[in-house]
Structure formats: C-alpha cells, structure tokens
Image: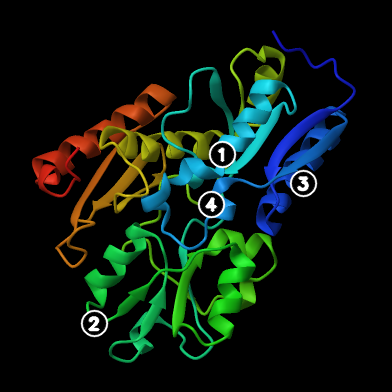
Amino acid sequence: MTQLTTPATIIATRESRLALWQAEHVRDVLQGRFGLQVQLLGMTTKGDQILDRALSKVGGKGLFVKELETALETGAAHLAVHSLKDVPMDLPPGFVLAAVWEREDPRDAFVSTRYAQLSDLPQGAVVGTSSLRRVVQLLAVRPDLRIEPLRGNLDTRLRKLDEGGFDAIVLAAAGLMRLKLAERIRSRFDPGQMIPAAGQGALGIEVREDNTALIELLAKTIHQPTFLSAHAERAVSRGLGGSCSMPLAAHAVWQGSQLRLDAALGDAAQPTRPLLKVQVSAAVTDEAGARALGAQAVAQLQAAGAGAYLPVA
C-alpha cells in the first residue's frame, strides 16, 4: 500500500497551459489546506502529439491520460489531474477517480473574431470543432454550416481562428475562463441548445486504488453536487459504450434535491440525422442514485431508437 511518506506528493499533468493551471490549482489547495509539499510532473501524452487526426480515429480521449496513469503505476507520481470530460468512463484496473471538484461554467462557448453568435453566421460559414457531440448539435440548428476539424491546445485553436481559418470555433467556456480568456467568448450556448459533454467544466483526480491514505485525504475535497452530477452524466456514456467516436451529450443540473439529467445522441455516420433527446429527474443523495438516474436516461434513449444510431461493434 502506498503511504504519504515521500518528501513530496507528485501530481502528473499534461503540459498544456490549461492542464498546468488545473494541476497548479490542485497543488495550491493541497498545500494550503493540508500542508502537503506538492510538486508537478509535466508530461506529453499521445493525445497532445497527434494533432492531424480526429481523436475518434486514433484511440479516443484515453490518449490524454495513458502516460499519466503509467506515472501513477510506476510510482513516479501519486495523483493525476484531468479535465473530467477527457477521462474515459471506465478506468483501468487498479485506478480510481478519488475526487471530483466543483465545476466551472459547463457551457460551450461561441468564439469568433467577426460574429457575435451562431445565428449571425452567414450561410455556409466554416466552424471549427473536432467534437462529434458539437458537430451534431450545431448541424441540428444550422445544417448549412461547414464544420471543419480543429485540434490542438486552447492557444493553438485560438491562433488558427485568428489566422482566418474559421469564421467561428466552439470551445468549452470553462477552459477560457480558467486561463483568463473570457473576453474571447462572444456568446455562450444555452445548454438546451448545446448540451455539454459528461463532466464538462469539472476537475477529476485519479489515483492508484491501493493508495488508501491519499484517497481518504482527497475524499475531504470532493464537491458533492458536482460529484453526483458527474456520475449521473458519466453513467449515460458508460451505458451506451460512450467514447469520442459517439456524438453523445449528457448534462445534469440540480433543482433543489432533484437532479435533472438531459442527454442527446446523434449519428456519427449521418451527422444531420435528427437528435435523440431525453430528460429525466430524481431525488439523488448518493453515487448509486446518480448512476441509476444515468441508467434511466440510457433506457429512454434505447427506447427511442438509440440502437440505430450507435456504431456497429
């Protein structure tokens, strides 16, 4: 069993500006609240290196976490900090999601140098995103748009927009806000129009399952409303075999003690096909209840014909 006896607790992190901000935020909280000595271990993942192909073509979002998990496995690091939406729904054996922290604005942001909102775009405008979830929801509102792939870290995507390659791009509002780039946001999509990805805006902390001392400490940092919301959302993706090759959205919001979960599924092979949308709600008090709510949404999507939208195994 790994104990907190090393001179420093080491956080494995990607080296993008946003990933470093997230890791530094976790470091500062752990140092300030628990008096830990914390260091960062910056790493480059395959997801950061492969920029000329869509994630759905080269292995999915797991490409952003594999190297970090290797560092945990070898003991080079004790925890890994992720944007929760990038964390695969099922972790490898021996790893656990020890904490979920309070989410930033979960909405998608419309970013453009010339236009204020989606409806202002001219016919046939070029919009950049590599997210199939965003593609199908954009085309549901504006089937005339030309959607072009856009990979790279946040700064790279903004540079490609500024160089004139796109009329607009769609990004997570949370990342822009965390890097003090909120002024780049021209408008935010209403979640009813563009349902966010499971876990969007939240931070997840992954550790080895046998690191019980660290798990117990991190349990004190969990933001329970976000933790339960994220588990409901991730249960939708897990129930449908979700990956970045599936245009699936899931977003939960609290209404008093009730958790309302909205989900939408598109067809990757036919992006203009009508979306399947469901909404479910229940009083949720624990992780089991959150997962059950996600399973309820999955059942309704399947009843609505999700099988015909899912890729053939």
Q: Residue at x 33, y 59 (%)?
A: 132
The residue under label 4 is which amino acid type? Answer: Gly
Q: Residue at x 29, y 80 (%)?
A: 145
Name the residue beneath numbered marker 4: 201
Q: Are marks 4 and 3 in contact (CB under 8 Å)?
A: no
Q: Looking at the image, is mark 1 or mark 3 earlier in the sequence?
A: 3
Name of the residue lying farthest toward the top: 1
The residue under label 2 is which amino acid type? Answer: Asp
Q: Residues within 10 Å of mark 1 (few under 14, many from 20)?
A: many
Marks 2 and 3, Cα distance to the nearest angstrom? 42 Å
Q: Looking at the image, is mark 2 or mark 1 earlier in the sequence?
A: 1
Question: Considering the numbered disc 3 on the image, is that residue within a helix, a strand or a loop?
Answer: helix
Q: Which mark is nearer the camera, 4 or 3?
A: 3
What percent of the width, then of the height, locates residue 221?
67, 31
Q: Residue 144 bears which disc, if any?
A: 2
Q: Residues within 10 Å of mark 4 (few under 14, many from 20)?
A: many
Question: Considering the numbered disc 1 on the image, is that residue within a helix, a strand or a loop?
Answer: loop
Marks 2 and 1, Cα distance to the nearest angstrom? 35 Å
Marks 4 and 1, Cα distance to the nearest angstrom? 17 Å
Q: Which mark is nearer the camera, 2 or 3?
A: 2
Marks 4 and 3, Cα distance to the nearest angstrom? 16 Å
Name the residue beneath numbered marker 3: 24
Question: Considering the numbered disc 2 on the image, is that residue within a helix, a strand or a loop?
Answer: loop
Considering the image in quadrants, where does the N terminus appear?
top right
Q: Looking at the image, is mark 4 or mark 2 earlier in the sequence?
A: 2
Q: Please determine whether, in this image, residue 24 is positioned above or below residue 151.
A: above
Question: Which is more toward the observer, 309 or 312?
Answer: 312
Q: Which mark is nearer the camera, 2 or 1?
A: 1
